[in-house]
Amino acid sequence: MFKALMVEKDAESGKTSASVTEIGLEDLPEGEVTVAVEYSTLNYKDGLCIGPGGGLVRNYPHVPGIDFAGTVESSQDPRYAPGDKVVLTGWRVGEAHWGGYAQKARVRADWLVPLPEGLDTRQAMAVGTAGFTAMLAVMALEDHGLTPGRGPVLVTGAAGGVGSVATALLAHLGYEVAAVTGRPEQEGYLRDLGAARIVPREELAETVKRPLESETWAGCVDAVGGAMLARVLGQMAYGGSVAAVGLAGGAQLPATVVPFLLRGISLLGIDSVMQPFDNRLRAWRRIAGDLPMDKLEEMIRPATLAELPALGEAILKGQVKGRVVVDVN
Ligand code: NDP
């Protein structure tokens, strides 16, 4: 028997509740590889899956946890053998399939990535889906011509998970990073990660009044969406790109097409869930090489399975700083 965070749904009220319980190997879903999970983490999506579901979880009882890192315990696939260190993000694990909030997980071999050299399982989960997605966003901006010489890069939702990793990565790569935050008390934290400038959230909160503002940003990693993304589009420098990662501030995009037509800007969609294996490997190798591990340590808030229901509520309210690392053991 081993520990898992189980979410149950009351058939009458439709309300969900999460608690730590004991389950056995026979309870795990089908898959070729069984992993002894060492660490998992907390992402915005986990907040939804631990709590109200957000339409992501279809079947209860459910074990959430959209990512994990650990050691292969048994494998029916030739690519993995007992003792191999692996990391998993995406593929709707923790939503449609039981996830990483348990001491063991069983998944498809196709969903795993060998842990890259230079990272241990705790560091991999300090990065987690949020950090992996930040890396995908930076890679997309670079693939569209962003270089440090082009000008400052904006990161929205900067004190959150995606934003913290994006800030540290970009600063380490030599970019001048402007960090947007609604939490002025996090200025010191963001400057330690490498932000050169702090932009108060209120400055970008208003909806678009003029389709074009001063050309300010060469690139942007946007975790917020909504009115803020629309404003940012009008502030992009000629030929600049925005990587759209999240919707912490809303799913609408009340923008005009003018910045696309007059400034040739690009809006790049970033999806971490269905990324092909080769690009996953590329992103994890870049993380191991380009993310300063001392900065990663500064982002970590350690947690246990039992703390997750409260932390899940906190992340949905935008109250979690940096990256929560869950020691499931
Ligand atoms: P966090 O909650 O850690 O970070 C989100 C940050 O956004 C908050 O910390 C806050 O930053 C800011 N924020 C929150 N609410 C608002 C608001 N109403 N208006 C403006 N800013 C706000 O979440 P994650 O970093 O884990 O995820 C960020 C987003 O990215 C989520 O929407 C998530 O679903 C999405 N995502 C998408 C992925 C993909 O594959 N495309 C993968 C991973 C995440 P501050 O306090 O600094 O203002």
Image (cartoon, rainbow, N blue to C red):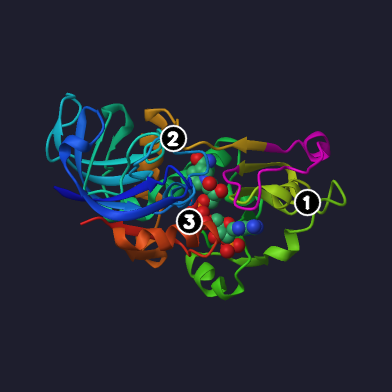
Q: Residue at x 84, y 47 (%)?
A: 212
Check the image and report above or below for 188 versus 153. below
Q: Residue at x 53, y 74 (%)?
A: 188
Residue 20 left/right relative to 251: left
Please report the bounds of the magenta region as a residue range: 244-266
Magenta run includes residue 40 = no
Near-viewer residue (22 or 196): 22
The overriding secondary structure of the stretch rendered in magenta is: loop
Q: Secondary structure at mark 1?
A: loop
- Closer to viewer: mark 1 or mark 2: 2
Reading the chain from its start, which is encountered first: label 3 or label 2?
Answer: 2
Q: Secondary structure at mark 3?
A: helix
Question: Which residue has dot 2 on it?
Answer: 58
Question: Which residue has dot 1 on it?
Answer: 215
Question: Which residue has dot 3 on it?
Answer: 161
Hey, what amino acid is under mark 3? Gly
